Amino acid sequence: MLRFKQALRYAVLATIGLAAVALSESVLQNTTTLYQAFHPGVFLHQGWFLLLFAACFGLAGACLDCPGRATRLSPWLRMLLLLVLYIGLFQVFRRSLAVGVAVAGLWKIGLVGLCVLAAWATARRASEATQWRIASAASVSLLAMFALQPGMPSYLLESLSLTGRRQPDPAPIAAPPQARRTVVVVLDEWDYEIAQREDFFTRRAMQAALRHSFSSSQAQPGGPNTLVSVPSMLRGQPFGPVRSGSPGVLTNARGETWQAGQPSLFSDLDAASVPYSIVGFYHDYCRVFPKARHCESEPVHFFPGWWSAATRSVRRSNEYDAAYGDFLRQWAGTYQHLRDAALRTAVETHSSFVWLHINVPHPPSAVMGARPHSLKEDYRSNLALTEAFVADLMQRLDAAGPDYALVLTSDHWLREKEMWRDIYARQVGPGAGDGGKTDDDQRVPFIVHFGKAEGPAVQSDQRVSTTALRKLVPLLIQRRVNSPQDVAAFFKEQGS
């Protein structure tokens, strides 16, 4: 019985320490991580490592440090247990209290060295009872720090789904008889300047999309990143910088929230009894819009796996330093899932409106099994996937019936200067992150294509904003905007 209790003590305390070390790399990265990684099930990936870690500590504790039967290795084993807990405290404080301070290189080695020294001193100088009291206090502190994170209790009560969230389809309702099928595709980080430079709009699929269409060369996104831009588009006004987040809820710097029940394009459609479906990336669409007829949303898997996360605190490298890390490995799978779900959902008959948010041409490369080469090469590869997706989508929409409207746009421009240049430089060397993007050009594509329409295409250089989607989409569905000329008149009337 004593051996079992000692094994359980070692296993539980070691698990708390390891969880603190590993989860701090994801859960405590920033104030919106709980919103972004909205499925606790992602932490069950590589769960065998966590179980093996706990089992090893438990077995060692039962055999080498059983009360009344201590061995010469007992102090060293307790030192190792204390070291895991101390590094956990170091990681939690580093992430939660000094989130803006990068600890790397010799500083990281030095601080981890202090944890080793503290564990050694505790094991050598303190009595056995004191060592266990310190270990228990450290584990309670770690549990309390995580429990007190905003949104953590509800986050831990979430489903343990290992993939994205799929909302059960409610009983079908008939679409309004005169409703036009309307599809909005938000292609992540699709940059107008780079697409134009790559002659993307001259490709066959894009030439087909530009026929019977309104297109703007001066479209501005709803925000500088996905977290801000999507709420801005659906609210019809800028959401602004995000201050904090918890499961299903974002709060901006003005104290406004983005959560279920807030006014948006989808609440407008609910009020008009227009059925809609969602396939989305990055945002927890299914929680924020629970009345969707069909919903699939894919989280961002920031958790790199137990081994990678647990060892990162003592390594001199970061998540993107490896040329083919965990984040890159799941990126292609995310695209494949979203692509298949989007193509299937876009032509289902129970919805008049479909919102699709796809993670291309956003770097890194989404080609299955591809390794990073350079920002320019990977972005070109993702543009090829974008062209293929648009071609497949239009083919399916045409086959289902030409009476549809398709909006193609992006959440934001290629943020090369913000993050990708440095990441690619670490992965594949200097110059690999140079995509040739200018600093001041933040345009995104904006195309409104009609499956059937009279009159020529309209190419506009009027400055427009993607936040106009909230007003434009209902007009497309209700057939009050029926041609490229009508779209141009709409934007002229909006004055933006």
Image (cartoon, grey):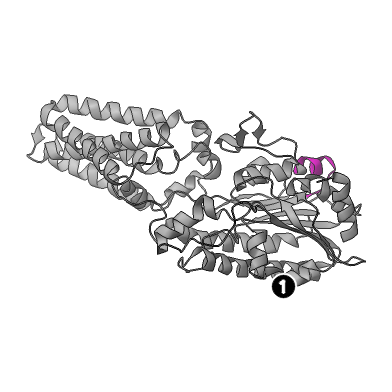
Let me know if residue 303 appears in the view. yes
**In the figure, is residue 376 to the left or right of 393?**
left
Give the quadrant of the N terminus.
top left
| Left or right, 412 with reference to 156 | right
| Residue at screen point 23% across, 25% down | 133
Q: Determine the main secondary structure of the stretch shown in magenta.
A: helix
Q: Residues within 10 Å of mark 1 (few under 14, many from 20)?
A: few
Q: Residue at x 73, y 40 (%)?
A: 235
Place of residue 312 in the rendered image (x, y in percent of width and height, measured from the top left): 33, 48
Q: Can residue 15 be found in the magenta stretch?
A: no
Q: Is residue 309 above or below residue 129?
A: below
Locate residue 461: give its quadrant: bottom right
User: Residue 236: x and y, percent?
Assistant: 76, 41
Write down the quadrant of residue 416 in the picture.
bottom right
226 displayed left or right of 89: right
Which secondary structure, mark 1?
helix
Residue drawn where x is 42% and y is 57% of the image: 326
Outermost residue toward the left in this view: 72
Give the x, y percent position of residue 180: 86, 57
| Residue 489 in the image, given as x and y percentages of width and height | 90, 52
Regarding residue 179, the answer to whether it shows in the image is no
Which residue lies under the disc numbered 1? 202
The stretch of residues the image draws in magenta is 266-275
Q: Amino acid at mark 1?
A: Thr
Give the mark count: 1
